[in-house]
Image (spheres, coloured by chain):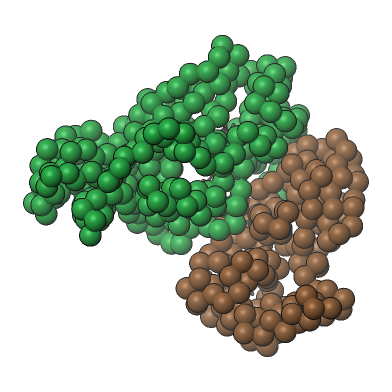
Amino acid sequence: MQVTITVNGVEHTRDVEPRMLLVHFIRDELLMRGTHWGCDTSNCGACTLWVDDEPVKSCTMLAVMADGKSITTVEGLAKGGELDPVQQGFMECHGLQCGYCTPGMMMCARALLDRNPHPTEEEIREGISGNICRCTGYKNIVAAIQWAADNPAAAQSEVTA
Amino acid sequence: MQTPAPVDYAKATSVADALAKLQEHGEEARVIAGGHSLLPMMKLRLARPDALIDLNDIPELTGIRIEGTEIVVGAMTRHREILESAILAEHYPIFREAERLIADPIVRNRGTIGGSMCQADPSADLSAVGSALKGSAVVVGPGGTRTVPLREFHQGPYETVVGPGEILTEVRYPIRPGAGSAYEKVERRAGDWGVATSGVYVVVSGGVVTDCGIGLAAVGAEHYCSPEGEAALVGKEPTEENLAAAAAATAESCSPNADQRGPADYKKHLANELTLRALRRAARASQGA
Ligand SMILES: Cc1cc2nc3c(=O)[nH]c(=O)nc-3n(C[C@H](O)[C@H](O)[C@H](O)COP(=O)(O)OP(=O)(O)OC[C@H]3O[C@@H](n4cnc5c(N)ncnc54)[C@H](O)[C@@H]3O)c2cc1C
Ligand code: FES
Ligand code: FES
């Protein structure tokens, strides 16, 4: 079945089997490996990307269901060579160890801050509660997102530019 | 790697189109809503439909509105929209309280009320809410439209009155002026299905409980409700003693199974305690406190 899916602003048309999961379309058809694929059971959130600006677990959506939609992956976070403040925050605060959960964490963090630019610690923890990290214990991830909330400069220069 | 078995797929553009496509693809076709129960089951071969009819692009199936004395929620309304609905927050805080504890924010972006009701998982929170509120379901099929009380909608675990070729289009809840409502759930960790849950509404008028509804999930309550608990409370003053007696009658009426989430006596204990907490809060809210 033919699908046309826009990923990070670029349109891709492919012929796929209806049973193909969106995560495999992104990783194996488009060879974009930023989106990770972890539990495969809708639990870990490593595969999170945005479908029309809403975070979705891409292991639990068929590629054909995304036909005609606009998708943003972790590769789409940085703009014009500038890291998103969320990405910067993960660097500043050591928000990752192995990095497996990181793309999903970042996609949820950015979506959270877009809706709620000044979240409390509890709201941050709630915002990433669909993302499992087996390394960090979450403390530094929460700190990284807080850092991004406190340093929205990169995002602001985007808006004013 | 888990991948569903080969399957046909078609996008429906209206309810009529969905019904026609279901007919066309035959008995083994299934509709897909958020896909957050169906796709995991297809990966595990617990479900193996021949064809999927996608309901995600049918605008008439989404949204929350008031119609006369009822709140109407379209079947494709996502958990997230229910969580954030001002209409539901005003009339029935039970929705917000339940939704905050359903899965996680990412799953809530996709999962729908229709999918949740039709999946009929014994632990489904919205099924408990619907039975507590004594709502109704609108089911449309080749034979026309019928309205089914939610307390008759579920026929058992993973079974509903929705037949092959039919779809659930909306869920309706009667508005009850002055009602208080609340939801309580114990889960093992954030985002998990409940070990036990209880959701209630209570109307207190002239110092007595004139009306109430008690819904339960994950504790083996038939049709996700406890008429026994309700009968124990209606007509009584909302004193701690009377609320406790109703909660005890509720726990008595359900028959939980032991599983990885806990032994049966623990779940019965939770049914009692969570119902009591929900009744207390709902009764207080109904009295404007
Ligand atoms: C990690 C995780 C945690 C979860 N935690 C919870 C939880 O704590 N509490 C809870 O209640 N739920 C929980 N869920 C379930 C979640 O609420 C699901 O989204 C929901 O049960 C199914 O909704 P869906 O829209 O994804 O349905 P789908 O998976 O698309 O469909 C489910 C079934 O319903 C049928 N169906 C769907 N819509 C219709 C319709 N309109 N008419 C007729 N048939 C229809 C489908 O054919 C299918 O058989 C969880 C899910 C996940 C993945
Ligand atoms: S791989 Fe999708 S949620 Fe874990
Ligand atoms: S950094 Fe290893 S899983 Fe989160």
Label count reads 0
- Image quarter for ligand 1 equals top right
Residue A9 visible in the snapshot: yes
Q: Height in image: B224 above or below A85?
A: above
| Image quarter in which the C terminus of chain B is found | bottom left
- The spot of residue B122 in percent (x, y) is 41, 39
Residue shown at 38%/47% (left/top)? B91
Residue A11 relative to residue B216: left or right: right
Residue shown at 32%/52% (left/top)? B182
The colour applied to the residues of chain B in this rendering is green
Q: Nearer the viewer, residue B79 or A106?
A: B79
Say which quarter of the image contains residue B140.
top right
The colour applied to the residues of chain A in this rendering is brown
Q: Height in image: B132 above or below A92?
A: above
- The spot of residue B16 in percent (x, y) is 67, 22
Residue shown at 74%/80% (left/top)? A156
Say which quarter of the image contains residue A54.
bottom right
Residue B253 visible in the snapshot: no
Toward the front, the furthest residue is B68
- The spot of residue A61 in percent (x, y) is 69, 46
Residue A136 relative to residue B122: left or right: right
- The spot of residue B118 in percent (x, y) is 51, 32
Q: Nearer the viewer, residue A136 or B102?
A: B102
Residue shown at 43%/43% (left/top)? B126
Q: Height in image: B20 above or below A1?
A: above
Q: Nearer the viewer, residue B268 or B116?
A: B116
Q: Nearer the viewer, residue B200 or B67?
A: B67
